[in-house]
Image (spheres, rainbow, N blue to C red):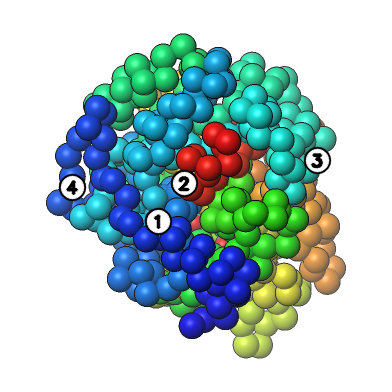
Amino acid sequence: MRPSSFLFVLAFGLDAAFARRAAPRATQNPAGVTGTRKSSFLKNVAGIPPVPPAAKVAATAFPVNDIQGDIIVGMQKPKELFYFFSIGDAASFKTHLAKDIAPILTSAEQMLNTTQQPLVLLNMAFSQAGLTTLGVLDSLGDTSFTLGQIKAIQTLAEKSDGWQQEFKGTGIHGVMLLASDTVDLINQQVAFLETTFGSSMRKVYALDGAMRPGALAGHEMFGYKDGIAQPALDGFGDTHPGQLVVPPGMILTGMDGDSGVRPVDGWMTGGSFLVFRQLEQLVPEFDKFLLDNAPIVEGKTLQERADLLGARMVGRWKSGAPIDLSPNQDDPALGNDVNRNNNFDFTHDGLDFKSDQSRCPFSAHIRKSRPRADVSSNISIMRSGIPYGGEVTAAEAASNTTSQARGLAFVSYQSSIAKGFEFIQKAWVNAPGFVFGKDVQPGFDPIVGQNFGGPRNVTGLDPNDTHKQLTLPLEFVVSRGGEYFFSPPISAFTGRLVA
Ligand code: N7H
């Protein structure tokens, strides 16, 4: 038995460990969307690691039957609806949770095993206001969660002016995540859920996400492949070269490596804090910036030079190929290869990685958000977002101006919001001094760094002079707000949440 499994069993006893994953979960809901799948609805995108094989995970003591499925799925969902709700009558809502919802929540086990995959993934998570409304008054051991995301704007260095009104207060009690391969199936399940809950639940806001069409599937709205680098939970299936292996408790509450103080009865074991952010992306403006500021490189066309600037801002080319391994041009074969596209740490023989930026700038998004050899810590989050909004129209491209909102419905899972998402945003991407080079201040992460809407300086982007400072003319990613949630283990829907 691996140490993590061993500790889990030690902490909660054999019975608890195995009872949580005993019976396979129901795959159908007689009154909702029925039917089983012959193949997984998760889209296989070259270069994005698939979910771990079910057989390998089954051999571990992970409570996969109890962990909500989205936590391990990543960014491979073709369609997803985020349905934010408030609770009307708590008593009636709880009755439905236990009777109608618990049996159809999708577990990690179901997502890993395609013969058990439902037609529509359903997961549910609650905000602090939601738990309070349900009468769940335990401290969950996470101050950021307790305060809610709107209270974190100072920490995140943003203003709430551009936030969706619905995210500004405490009116959102929870979110349902519904994912499938068709919008029609999702809509059918929504109709069932609304009928089931009746007046005990009210829709507050909703956001539709979808993979981009055709060859752009798996790429976010600026065009870069996303979802390549995810942490592996120690003892949970396969790992790929370069993948960061973290204790399961870094993502899952109550598991080995979780440093939070949780309720003693262990009802939070196998849950995770879910950070939701609606991040609008100004794509035509971003593209124009790349063309206007393309570095001078002999032998390259203007578009190739613009692509180089974009790759230096992100740290990867659009194919997913890391610039640390391919600094001068995109290499789609590298981007598509899960055994190579994550296997780098910014160090190279003969180069001083504390001063050399000929390959990946210190300020690049992937270096700021996961500094690899630059730091000794293994801070990490599991990203599970999806693009929203339509493709850029011809009129928007011609005018270099966004007129239809699009972006990333950002989701991250972690066992501590302060040590996960907030830490990365505050201490790394927003901190001009980080990554600590020898003789240059990197400035902000040019993709998601925030400075209360004020000017953001950045260095390292021009390969001809990596000390040159550029002031970015605007935020290409604009926060429309979000909320912090707890995604409980499925057993809590018939246990603590309804007690
Ligand atoms: Fe990022 N992008 O297109 O530039 N992100 N991200 N992110 N991000 C990553 O490795 C992007 C955001 C992380 O381990 C890739 O999967 C965009 C926030 C982390 O090497 C690309 C937005 C936060 C990683 C993007 C956005 C993070 C990562 C490379 C917003 C946390 C893994 C593909 C609209 C505060 C780094 C990949 C590693 C990767 C983009 C948001 C964090 C292409 C457009 C808010 C930890």
Please indicate, yes or no, whether residue 319 appears anywhere in the rendered image.
no
> Considering the image in quadrants, where does the C terminus appear?
top right
Mark 1 and mark 2 residues within 8 Å of each other at the beta carbon: yes
Label 3 element class: helix
Please indicate, yes or no, whether residue 126 appears anywhere in the rendered image.
yes
N-terminal of the pair, mark 4 or mark 2, is 4
Tell me the residue that label 4 is attached to.
37
At horizontal 67% and vertical 62% (from top left) the residue drawn is 258
Tell me the residue that label 3 is attached to.
155
From what the image shows, is residue 149 above or below residue 296? above
Tell me the residue that label 1 is attached to.
65
Neighbor class of circle 4 (other Cα within 10 Å; few <14, some 14-19, many 20+) is some
- The residue type indicated by label 2 comes to Ile
Q: Position of residue 434 (x, y in %)?
A: 78, 59
N-terminal of the pair, mark 4 or mark 1, is 4
Cβ of disc 3 within 8 Å of ligand 1? no
Marker disc for residue 490: 2
Neighbor class of circle 2 (other Cα within 10 Å; few <14, some 14-19, many 20+) is many
Q: Disc 4 versus disc 2: distance between alpha carbons?
A: 22 Å
- Between circles 1 and 3, the one closer to the viewer is 1
Residue located farthest toward the bottom when viewing the structure as drawn = 350
From what the image shows, is residue 185 above or below residue 27? above
N-terminal of the pair, mark 3 or mark 2, is 3
- The residue type indicated by label 4 comes to Arg
Mark 4 and mark 2 residues within 8 Å of each other at the beta carbon: no
